[in-house]
Amino acid sequence: MPLVEWDEIRPLLVCPRCRADLETGPGGLHCTDSACAHHSPAAFPLVDHRPVLVDFERSVVTRDSVTPFAGRADARQGADRLPVPLRHLVKPPNRVAARNLDLLLRALPGPAPRLLVVGGATVGNGVGALYRNPDVRVIGFDIVTSPVTQFVADAHRIPLRSASVDAVLVQAVLEHVLDPASVVAEIHRVLKDGGLVYAETPFLQQVHAGAHDFTRYTASGHRYLFRRFEEIASGPVAGPGTQLLWSVDHLVRGLTGNALAGRVARTGLFWLRGLDRLVAPDFALDGASALFFLGSRREREMSPGEIIGYYRGAQSAR
Ligand SMILES: [Zn+2]
């Protein structure tokens, strides 16, 4: 697995509050700036040998929520717990992500580009190839510890130096952060000039992480979120058929008060997902379950006029 070794990551780490250098002391890391609140010894403790680089006073992450992964219950949720054939009915492999990741990997500058996975505690659907590619050096972080991440952090304050990575993957994460624009600004900051970002974000999906689910985006809204990026590709990850499956699931949950009943209904109607392929691309954009954006970092910001001209859905003025 091409996860970057600690010795390579350590020089890239900075204080999440003031972005000063970090120093290693007994029990963990701390900020080198004596004026910073995180200057005290072990301000950033270790959990599972991973530094917890969170500014807790300014984060929804709490100290108690960062626990060793060995002591946690099975972190897999819903469909991920099912045996493979059934899991693929409920949650099929994400071929759109696989194709776009391939596009991203081929566009990355060599040799050995560094790719940051934001919210990477679990390997995302369709991006497994990334973790098997010996040419890419993967850095991952999340708000919990995991065997596929090297530190714990809050994406609103990424504890990495500016221009330290060649690419960023942020899949099914931006709906779970309080301020997506701040997170995208951080992604822009840590990327090298011309660096690439791949994002997948829900448009029409019900709440799926309880208190940690905040935002949805239309295609235009998602594009404008990445307004300081040049678009390489964008479109639906899944269309209106998948959206209908989500709605049936949550309607049945609502009628029965039972999440399992909803999942059973969704599994029985799996064929509705096939309708995605029959929907015209412009209608698919207006009714997508989730959307993707692949782009390269630039300084120039998209103007309000440009975003109005950007719309490619089925309601364009003809
Ligand atoms: Zn500091």
Image (cartoon, grey):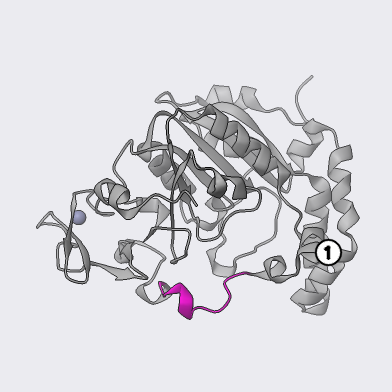
Figure check: 107 above or below 11: above
Quadrant into which the C terminus falls: top right
Residue 299 quadrant: top left
Let me know if residue 11 appears in the view. yes
SS of the residue under disc 1: helix
In the image, what residue type sits under mark 1? Arg
Does 246 lie within the magenta span? Answer: no
Give the extent of the magenta segment. 66-76
Q: Is residue 131 above or below residue 233?
A: below
Pick out the residue farthest to the left: 34
Q: In which quadrant of the rendered view does residue 191 lie? A: top left
Q: What is the x, y in percent for residue 67?
A: 41, 75
Please tell me which residue is depicted at 85% across the width and 40% down the height of the picture.
277
Badge 1 is on which residue? 266
- State the residue at coordinates (90%, 54%): 271
Image: 259 above or below 103: below
Please provide percent x and percent y for residue 27. Answer: 21, 71
Query: 167 and 109: which one is in front?
Result: 109
The magenta stretch spans residue 68: yes
**Viewer-nearest residue: 156 or 75:** 75
Q: How many marks?
A: 1
Pointer 1 local density, CA inside 10 Å: few below 14, some 14–19, many at least 20: many
Kindly tell me whether residue 153 is visible in this rendering: no
Horizontally, is 88 left or right of 177 in the view?
A: right
Decide which of 25, 215 is in the foreground and name it. Answer: 25
